[in-house]
Image (cartoon, rainbow, N blue to C red):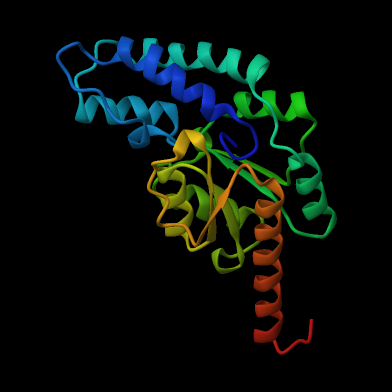
Amino acid sequence: MDGVLVDSEDYWHVAEREEILPRVIADDSPTPELDEVTGMYYGEIYDYLVEHYEVAVDKDEFMALYEETATSIYGERVELLDGAREFVDDLRDGGVPVALVSSSPRDWIEAVLDRFGLAFDLIAPAEEFDGPGKPEPGLYEEAIRDLGGSVDRAVAIEDSENGVLAAARSGAYTIAVRDDHNADTDLSAADQVVDRDDPEALFASVRQSTRTIRESASGSNGNSG
């Protein structure tokens, strides 16, 4: 969702760099790079910081900081990627099941869906998954199974290093979205990288990938399609 459907990563990066991490990380500890934690479930971000850095707040305070920031970002500030609503609707109308696989909790996701009138066949938040979230592949693997699909016939769109790794490790064809906020992020695990400034190119890449997968599946079944 973040950085793919809506421009929330632009706001999250500023908030994490200027407000959240300075309050969370102890003064005598180095500060993590944002790419280390971007794309992770925020409950797991805290665990990661505790393991690798010295923190100055407990988990409850940390979670509250993220929740307060999320209310402002999703409720007031984010904008939808041009054409995203129509694109998702078009895929679903064409018989392509679409899941929203996100490290954001369900209430943040639903705030965005309600605000912009979006609908998906499946919502898969990391907080509801019984296992490690991104960059591990399990969240994607379970969502694909729940859609009734298989990883070799799935296409994933991501914009963070952790998200790209999760999708690619699952076996899904992975398209990464490049934007100003991730200009230096390692997206090399993706099968394809598309510029967010050109939404039509992104949509075309997804359509082409989906079409290729369907044609390949039809061919392997001995059907003409």
Q: Nearer the viewer, residue 179 or 99?
A: 179
Left or right: where 213 falls relative to 176:
right
In the picture, the quarter occupied by the N terminus is top right
Q: Is residue 59 above or below residue 160?
A: above
- Residue 53: image x %, image y %? 20, 25
Q: Is residue 103 above or below residue 141?
A: above
Query: What residue is at 55 percent from the left and 68 percent from the top?
Result: 152
In the picture as drawn, the residue positioned furthest to the right comes out as 93
- Residue 155: image x %, image y %? 60, 59
In the picture, the quarter occupied by the C terminus is bottom right
Query: What residue is at 53 percent from the left and 61 percent from the top?
Result: 172
Left or right: where 215 falls relative to 102:
right
In the picture as drawn, the residue positioned furthest to the left comes out as 28
Q: Is residue 220 above or below residue 106?
A: below
Left or right: where 144 falls relative to 65:
right
Q: Nearer the viewer, residue 115 or 197?
A: 197
Query: What residue is at 42 percent from the left and 58 percent from the top?
Result: 169
- Residue 158: image x %, image y %? 53, 46
- Residue 65: image x %, image y %? 44, 12
Quadrant of the image occupied by residue 52:
top left
Q: Nearer the viewer, residue 137 or 75?
A: 75
Quadrant of the image occupied by residue 222:
bottom right
Query: What residue is at 78 percent from the left and 40 percent from the top?
Result: 85
The total of numbered circles placed on residues is 0
Q: Is residue 151 above or below residue 20?
A: below
Quadrant of the image occupied by residue 37:
top left
